[in-house]
């Protein structure tokens, strides 16, 4: 029983990071109809920047802020310079561009920061809480992770629902041409969308790094998991991203925890889940049948 | 609400045959636009006078929609000029048009389906910055059907309601001229009459100018002052609406009735 | 009927105008246009046979005049090109992108390694056929799943495959060797080969050279078959499925089946490539089949132009000869070995980005595009001159 609780808890914690990453993917998909395969490398880049600061003696929190800000800038630059020329064109072109960015960025990280495995500090304790005699797989750090993801989502929700910028971004995402006719600076909104998504991506990169090891390719699996989670929830649905992330986190945790030698099969399990979703319900759990024509 | 352009209020109804000259609000000269090698517009010239409804008519594929899209900047013209209130807007970016006083309601209405009715309206006024609440109330007054729907996603609206929504949204931009692309499409005649009646009222009471593209020439001519007939990207004839209505041969040849 | 229609053709493009837009998938080699001035035989099969023979002769010459190190590089080239050839047909002709072909190569490699490990291994050709068969089966499975996907969904799914499949090697540690992988015992060159080399050039008939020949033979056969496939009814149907889905379906074409076929063919190529790789590298390990491999293949076919076999060959040459060049360059700039090694993937990524933004039709494709445009202009002016 206790193992079940622990496996569930760690699944949820991991799942919340998947959810954040999936959310970043969904943000970009909704606004520009592109899956940003480079999201992981972008996040890794900002994590390495943070790491450099930490290793130079700065506090984790300063490094966090710097990482998020550089994520913002990176996202904006990438959209404006690299992605804009292929937006609205054949989807294959955009896929290849983001893949190219993925490879280039990852190699660049290795060139600048080296390929070795480095440990990344966690801002809070990583020993599980004790309840009576038993230690639960819930650590102060995991509470931080959950909290950070939750706060981010609430902020994003508030932004989109209650602010004018949020409304402009949604209009740009759902009706680009109409929004332009209404005077919305759609280009800027798309750039902003990418920038915000990159911030969320950076955050998930930092959260998953904390207390573990980082190396240039450390986000590779998270790209896959984030994508699977986003597809599971429905690429068009932010709520779906969150639910998908949590479900996926749980599923993978169970595979890893209860299937013998399951940890080697985790990636394959993600693939299986992806294929099942794509074949059975390609729109995802929260696929909406909203008529997108007006 | 006073008309900011000072154009003389003209008697209601179509025609404007009293001879009161009103300044042109929109002038199109020799506009040519192409999709690849196909010329959708070939040297089109027209004038929309302030405080009038100018109808652009013609069969499918005549270039009516392309005309509006070129005027509002969605399509880049090959040659020609578009002037709004004296200002050359031929190469102005699309996003700047509302700021200059031109609101374009596109073909298909352009309702943003995922947003609510209220949010759709708010998008229409975003570029203006802060907009007083009573301006929204006024739109709801003009289109009371929208009140009960205000928090529903726009895709739940019927065709007629959508048309009202997008006109209301355009009004929130406080335009000098309204470009309307086939508002009657897919709507029951009763609703069409309602909407056109509303348009006429807005024009007469507030001096709004309208450039109306319609395939339903009969309804359009019943409410317009001036008619411009397009065929294969060229202007065939421009005249007072009542004159066009009376010309049976023309109607049969180009307007389908 | 010109098959230059692409997903981004602007509406109303005249039927005999050159392709208006260069897109990633625009560059399918077109059916031989009427009146092509060519000194090659008219019949496609004969033409390809002639090229095959010339290619074989050229290969022998190339392998004999170069040193053993270059021989091994050329061996590398063969397996990249085989995989790239299949992939360019899949992506270029049929519009399906795949990031999983590195994983499929792994299937071919591991199968080969396992069969060569036997006490008395089967003849090499048989083992290769087995590797192709196994990979084809896996490819069919993946292809069936992939047939309903497109664009980013397909990319994501194949990405998951590329990241997930190596896990199997770790799970089945005993048979598949885990992280270390499986050593491959390359078979010795047959006597016939030794006497052949002796007669032709007198060079020492090393195993390296033998493996290079094996790879070259596989490459020549594969490209011959692929070239014929591309020009055949099958190739045309693939292109129809890619470009005009609705029309194809209405014509009674089963879209899914044809997509699976394309996937299967490309998987077979990947399997063969993996088999050759196993021989040349003498090792089948997860580290040899990373995501970067799949992305390198993608770079090769993008640079060469999607759908072009020549382009696939050129792109593969890039994959082989660029890394050492770039690594040396990096060392000159003071980078250490591991860092300099990353310059090659960096270049791949940059190339992909730049290619998509500026020349989506690839190098070969852009050349072809210019040629077609020039030809169309000449035809148009000729018609105008003759009073059209």
Image: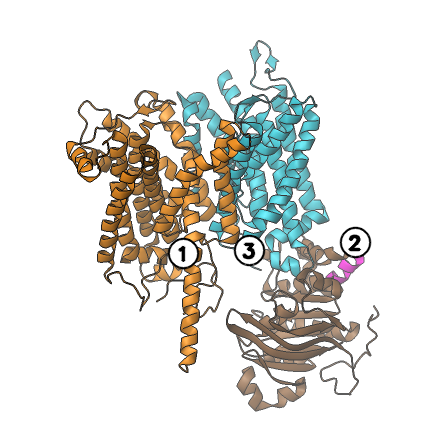
Chain colours: A cyan, B brown, C orange
> Hey, which quadrant is residue B5 in on the image?
bottom right
> The C terminus of chain A appears in which quarter of the rendering?
bottom right
C-alpha distance separating marks 3 and 2: 29 Å
Return the residue nearer the eye: B145 or B172: B172
Disc marking residue A292: 3
Disc 3 with disc 2 on a shared chain? no
Position of residue A251 measured from the top left corner of the image (x, y, whole percent):
47, 29
**SS state under label 1:** loop
Q: Is residue A282 visible?
A: no
**SS state under label 2:** loop
**Highlighted range, magenta:** B130-141
Q: Chain of mark 1?
A: C
Position of residue A162 measured from the top left corner of the image (x, y, whole percent):
71, 45
> Hey, which quadrant is residue A122 in on the image?
top right
User: How busy is the neighbourhood of tag 2: few (under 14 within 10 Å), some, or many (20 plus)?
Assistant: few
Q: Residue furthest front?
A: C202
**Mark 1 — residue?**
C27
In the rendered structure, are the residues bearing label 1 and label 2 in contact, judged by CB atoms less than 8 Å apart?
A: no
Disc marking residue B130: 2
In this view, B143 is above or below A230: below
In the rendered structure, are the residues bearing label 3 and label 1 in contact, judged by CB atoms less than 8 Å apart?
A: no
Residue B138 falls within the magenta-colored stretch: yes
Q: Chain of mark 2?
A: B
Residue at x-position 53% and y-position 34%:
A106
């Amino acid at each position: 029983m206790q193992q079940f609780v622990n496996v569930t808890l760690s699944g949820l914690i991991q799942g919340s990071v998947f959810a954040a990453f999936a959310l970043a993917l969904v943000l970009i998909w909704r606004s520009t109809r592109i899956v940003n395969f480079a999201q992981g490398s972008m996040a890794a880049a900002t994590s390495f920047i943070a790491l450099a600061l930490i290793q130079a003696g700065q506090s984790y929190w300063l490094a966090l802020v710097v990482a998020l800000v550089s994520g913002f800038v990176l996202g904006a630059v990438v959209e404006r310079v690299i992605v804009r020329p292929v937006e609205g064109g054949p989807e294959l072109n955009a896929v290849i561009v983001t893949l190219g960015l993925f490879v280039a960025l990852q190699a660049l990280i290795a060139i600048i920061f080296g390929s070795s495995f480095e440990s990344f500090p966690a801002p809070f304790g990583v020993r599980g809480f004790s309840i009576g005699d038993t230690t639960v797989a819930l650590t102060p750090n995991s509470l931080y992770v959950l909290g950070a993801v939750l706060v981010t989502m609430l902020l994003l929700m508030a932004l989109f629902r209650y602010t004018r910028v949020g409304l402009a971004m949604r209009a740009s995402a759902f009706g680009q041409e109409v929004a332009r006719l209404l005077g919305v600076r759609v280009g800027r909104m798309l750039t902003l969308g990418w920038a915000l998504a990159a911030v969320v991506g950076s955050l998930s990169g930092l959260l998953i790094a904390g207390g573990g090891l980082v190396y240039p390719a450390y986000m590779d699996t998270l790209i896959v998991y984030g994508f699977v989670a986003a597809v599971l929830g429905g690429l068009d649905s932010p709520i779906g991203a969150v639910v998908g992330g949590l479900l996926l986190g749980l599923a993978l945790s169970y595979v890893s925890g209860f299937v013998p030698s399951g940890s080697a099969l985790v990636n394959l399990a993600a693939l299986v889940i992806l294929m099942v979703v794509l074949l059975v319900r390609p729109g995802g759990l929260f696929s909406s049948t909203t008529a997108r024509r007006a | 609400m006073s008309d900011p352009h000072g154009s003389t209020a003209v008697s209601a109804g179509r025609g404007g045959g009293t001879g009161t000259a009103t300044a042109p609000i929109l002038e199109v000269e020799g506009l040519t636009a192409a999709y690849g090698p196909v010329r959708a517009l070939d040297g089109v010239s027209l004038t929309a006078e302030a405080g009038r409804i100018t109808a652009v008519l013609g069969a499918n594929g005549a270039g009516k929609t392309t005309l509006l899209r070129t005027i509002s900047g969605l399509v880049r013209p090959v040659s020609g000029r578009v002037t709004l209130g004296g200002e050359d807007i031929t190469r102005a970016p699309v996003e700047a048009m509302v700021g200059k006083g031109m609101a374009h309601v596109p073909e298909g209405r352009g309702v943003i389906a995922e947003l609510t009715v209220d949010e759709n309206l708010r998008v229409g006024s975003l570029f203006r910055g802060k907009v007083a609440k009573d301006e929204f109330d006024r739109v709801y007054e003009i289109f009371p059907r929208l009140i009960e729907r205000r928090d529903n996603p726009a895709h739940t609206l019927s065709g007629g309601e959508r048309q009202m929504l997008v006109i209301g949204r355009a009004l929130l931009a406080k335009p000098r001229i309204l470009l309307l692309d086939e508002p009657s499409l897919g709507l029951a005649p009763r609703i069409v009459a309602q909407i056109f009646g509303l348009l006429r009222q807005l024009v007469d009471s507030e001096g709004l100018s309208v450039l109306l593209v319609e395939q339903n020439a009969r309804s359009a001519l019943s409410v317009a002052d001036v008619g411009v007939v397009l065929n294969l990207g060229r202007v065939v004839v421009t005249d007072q609406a009542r004159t066009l209505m009376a010309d049976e041969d023309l109607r049969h040849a180009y307007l389908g009735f | 009927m010109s098959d230059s229609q692409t997903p981004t053709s602007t509406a109303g493009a005249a039927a005999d105008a050159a392709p208006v837009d260069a897109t990633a998938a625009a560059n399918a080699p077109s059916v031989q246009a009427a009146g092509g001035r060519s000194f090659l035989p008219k019949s496609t099969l004969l033409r390809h046979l002639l090229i095959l023979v010339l290619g074989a002769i050229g290969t022998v010459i190339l392998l004999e005049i170069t040193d053993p190190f270059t021989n091994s590089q050329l061996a590398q080239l063969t397996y990249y090109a085989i995989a790239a050839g299949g992939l360019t047909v899949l992506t270029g002709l049929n519009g399906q992108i795949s990031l999983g072909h590195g994983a499929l190569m792994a299937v071919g490699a591991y199968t080969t390694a396992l069969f060569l490990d036997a006490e008395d291994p089967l003849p090499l050709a048989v083992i290769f056929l087995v590797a192709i068969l196994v990979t084809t089966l896996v490819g069919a499975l993946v292809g069936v799943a992939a047939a309903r996907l497109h664009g980013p969904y397909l990319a994501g799914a194949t990405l998951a495959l590329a990241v997930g499949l190596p896990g199997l090697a770790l799970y089945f540690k005993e048979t598949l060797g885990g992280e270390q992988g499986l050593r491959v015992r390359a078979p010795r060159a047959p006597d016939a080969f030794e006497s052949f080399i002796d007669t032709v050039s007198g060079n020492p008939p090393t195993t390296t050279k033998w493996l290079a020949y094996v790879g070259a033979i596989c490459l020549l056969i594969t490209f011959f078959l692929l070239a014929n496939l591309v020009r055949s009814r099958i190739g045309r149907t693939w292109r129809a499925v890619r470009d005009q889905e609705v029309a194809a379906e209405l014509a009674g074409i089963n879209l899914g089946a044809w997509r699976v076929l394309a996937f299967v063919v490309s998987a077979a190529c990947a399997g063969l490539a993996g088999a050759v790789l196993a021989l040349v590298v003498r090792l089948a390990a997860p580290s040899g089949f990373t995501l970067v491999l799949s992305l390198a293949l993608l770079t090769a076919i993008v640079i060469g132009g999607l759908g072009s076999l020549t382009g696939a060959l050129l792109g593969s040459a890039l994959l082989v000869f660029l890394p050492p060049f770039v690594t040396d360059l990096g060392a000159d700039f003071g980078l250490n070995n591991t860092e300099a090694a990353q310059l090659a993937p960096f270049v791949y990524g940059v190339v992909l980005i730049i290619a998509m933004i500026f020349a989506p039709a690839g190098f070969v494709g852009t050349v072809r595009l210019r040629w077609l445009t020039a030809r169309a202009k000449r035809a148009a002016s000729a018609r105008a001159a003759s009073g059209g």
